[in-house]
Amino acid sequence: MSDSRYRMYFFDLDHTILDFERSESEALIEVFKSRGVTLSSSQVESYRQINRKWWSMLEKGTVSKERVVVERFEEFCRLIDINFDANDLNEEYLMGLSNRAYFLPGAEEFLHQFKNAGRRMAIITNGVYRVQLNKFRIASLHRFFEFSLSSEEAGYAKPDPRIFAVALEKAGVQKDEAVYIGDSLESDFSGAQKAGIDFIWINPEAEPGKGPFMIARDFIELKAVLEGLEA
């Protein structure tokens, strides 16, 4: 790669670098199996829908993260008609989730190449701090990223532009010197746009040319997009 247009490349973590759905399924199934309950694939999908709904509420600023992580399990238990303590479920689930970290296809190779090209990278995530910290360690993400900033550390959750302001200050760069790469239009794109930071949407189902942002469907396309910016 030639001289870069950007001095700092910020990434989302789950669904962008790491395969969250695989970790989520394994951790969820394990927690209920330890209680004698075998979840079906449809029940796992129901949990995912409930979980997405609660995290979307967090991104809208209507609930706290502390409420999200417990009430998602309360709602799920009501749905499957089982009476387990939601706090206990959440603690065990977060433990199981924090012990798993799988790269999405092409992610690790891309990060190696990008790091070797001298690019500075960091993570901005809404994920639970202690979970993300452990996944950062398990996947040895320090090989690639200077730091990982969680919403708990920053005091603001995406799409609040203030979490991006904290990241910019931590990295020592201006907003026009950075780009944010993520999978969510609701939190990642909206937050980057409000912060005045360029955005690249990485999504395997994205339609090229759709939307006021750059698009990559995988890490091969992401590399091509970035090389195109630097041509």
Image: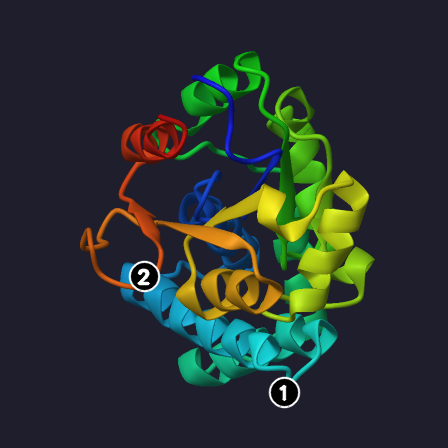
Position of the N terminus by quadrant: top left
Among the two numbered marks 1 and 2 on one chain, the one whose residue lies closer to the N terminus: 2
Q: In this view, does 12 lie above or below 63?
A: above
- The percent coordinates of residue 115 (x first, y second) are 56, 19
Q: Residue 62 carries which label?
A: 1
Q: Residue at x 69, y 72 (%)?
A: 65
Q: Which residue is drawn at 34% across and 65% down?
A: 45
In the image, 230 versus 158, the foreground residue is: 230
Q: In this view, does 196 lie above or below 21?
A: below
Q: Which mark is residue 104?
A: none
Question: Local crowd at mark 1 within 10 Å, few (<14), some, or many (≥20)?
Answer: few
Q: Is residue 23 above or below residue 7?
A: below
- The percent coordinates of residue 202 (x first, y second) are 36, 47
Residue assigned mark 2 = 40
The chosen color scheme is rainbow
Residue type highlighted by circle 1: Thr
* Residue 11 shows in the view: no
In the image, 178 versus 24, the foreground residue is: 178
